[in-house]
Image (cartoon, helix red, strand yellow):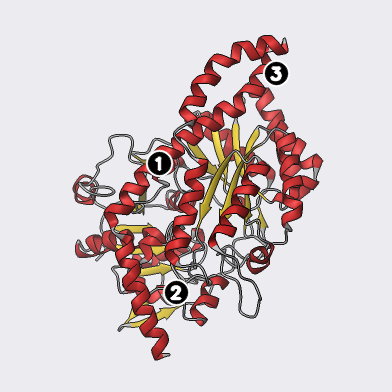
Amino acid sequence: MLDVSKKRLRLRIIIPAYPAFNIYSHIADKTTALGPVCIASVVNEMEGWDVEVIDENNLRRYGPRSGSLGADHEFLQRQRPADVVGFYGGLTSTIPRLYEIARFYKNQGVITIAGGQHFVEDNIAEALNSGIDYVVIGEGEETIKELLQSIEGKRKIGEIKGVAYLNAKEVICTPEREPIADFNKLPLADFSLVRYAKIKVYPVGRIRGCGMDCEFCTVKGKPRYASAERLLEQISSLLETQDARHFFVVDDLFGQERDETIRFCNMLRDYQSKVGRRLDFFVQIRLDKAKDPQLLWAMRQAGINTVAIGFESPIEEELRAMNKHLLPQDMLSLTRIFHNYGFLIHGMFIFGYPIPEGVNFTMSVSQRIERFKSFIKKAKIDTIQILLPGPLCGTQLRRRLARQNRIYPLPDVGWEYYDGNFPLFEPDEPMTAEEMQHAARKLMGKFYQFKSILMLGLLVFSFPALALFLHNIKLGWRKWYRPWRNDLARFGGWIVMKKWAWQFKKDKFLARLQAAKAHLKIRQAIV
């Protein structure tokens, strides 16, 4: 139980480690999640509370690592005992690790709290029976303050909105809390609260919510906006206090509030000019924003160099199934516009998306592969990410596949495989789960190749000749940099793919998949 007689109490927020075989671990050790830092920043202003964030994926500064995975929590508790521990459940693949750590702290008599996109529907009960005392439902900045006051005995738990807990083994959910509308009343995210991490890319954001309603996505609801001034204040604060140079704008769709986004870009351009620093920004944006030249020009002037675009698929039937309002025949011309403005494009794809019932569509695996290969080559995308469809909790896709009884049982294919790299359900005929996974790996392997290191060597020696030929060093640099950067990324991707393939073999996933398919057939026969 909480010792309220102590002068100061400590909340530790933990971002659980990815599974050992996750291919994104190399990115995670350069950044962190924004949500836990926002929650920590709120608690840091509460009287009588200390707070820290431990990102198990980023322990680059003398971090106390465990022998296998993540942080050494026994060491952390000896060194700086936490009275309450919060867990970030924003990534489904980290949930088994989250429960593992939660049980450790629970056995130590520590109060445990969890929140994040994973904890919806039946997963609330799962969490409350897996070492979690309280689940925060929805956004947590306001709820966490009231919950900690309740833990201190200053407020009744039933008065708090957006909390779930067990009462005599019965799950109690308090009324939902309205989403936050006024972001100016919240403190800026304080990244100094993240201990042991070495952050190179800082996540920042202005918009919460997305109105696109894609079937596979958990982010829903009318977008809510912070002011352009607030986002610029966060960036300037990070530059001044952390010497931050690289930023990832986490908004699901950059430019949703078009006029305010352009105003922000103009403010950011002027700010960089005044301080004499050129900053680098990475954003997520819709492909159809290529139709807005004023927005694209403002973005480039502001230092936005790389855009992540959810192409998802070059197959029209799959796009319709996803609720994507795009046509394949328009995608190449729109991509060309982004390239013409000088953006580096990170293309995000989903291979093997399941088609809804009643739609007459059949395509072989080889035909799908050729469609993807042809589009990626013609679009000249700089880097790619090809994932498998993930029936994440709370999505329309999961509800549809569950209704069709196609999702593999969790005892066979657990939450740790919900990262987009593994088949999680029976795909459409004639494709098998094994073929679907092999196809995605084949496409990635075709793009990220060892031979890119040879091209890098040639490019290093070609720059002086190119600049001399063009009679302009600056123009020569622009012509030279993109292929050099892409070959470097492709060689790095080849290394990551090799490591992932080794972990995949070590994990023996195919054996799990065979058991999952067998158990699913039994369940389908019973139903």
Cα separation, mark 1 vs mark 2, equals: 28 Å
Q: Position of residue 160 (x, y in %)?
A: 47, 71
- The answer to whether residue 23 is above or below residue 464 is below
Would you name the residue on which mark 3 appears? Answer: 475
> Which residue lies most toward the bottom here?
526
Q: Residue 155's quadrant in the figure? A: bottom left
Cα separation, mark 3 vs mark 1, equals: 32 Å
Instruction: Indicate which disc, 1 or 2, sits on the residue closer to the N terminus.
Output: 2
Q: Position of residue 209 (x, y in %)?
A: 62, 60
Give the residue at x 60% y 53%: 370
SS for tag 1? helix
Crowding near pointer 2: few (<14 within 10 Å), some, many (20+)? many
Q: Position of residue 90 (x, y in %)?
A: 45, 59
* Of 44 and 252, the residue lying toward us: 252
- The answer to whether residue 285 is above or below residue 485 is below
| Residue 412 seen in render | no
Identity of the amino acid at label 3?
A: Leu
Q: Position of residue 451 (x, y in %)?
A: 47, 31
Contact flag, marks 1 and 2 (Cβ < 8 Å): no
Would you name the residue on which mark 2 appears? Answer: 407
Mark on residue 496?
1
SS for tag 2? loop
* Of 73 and 482, the residue lying toward us: 482
Identity of the amino acid at label 2?
A: Ile
* Of 63 and 449, the residue lying toward us: 449
Crowding near pointer 1: few (<14 within 10 Å), some, many (20+)? some
Cα separation, mark 3 vs mark 2, equals: 53 Å
Residue 105 appears left or right of 21? left
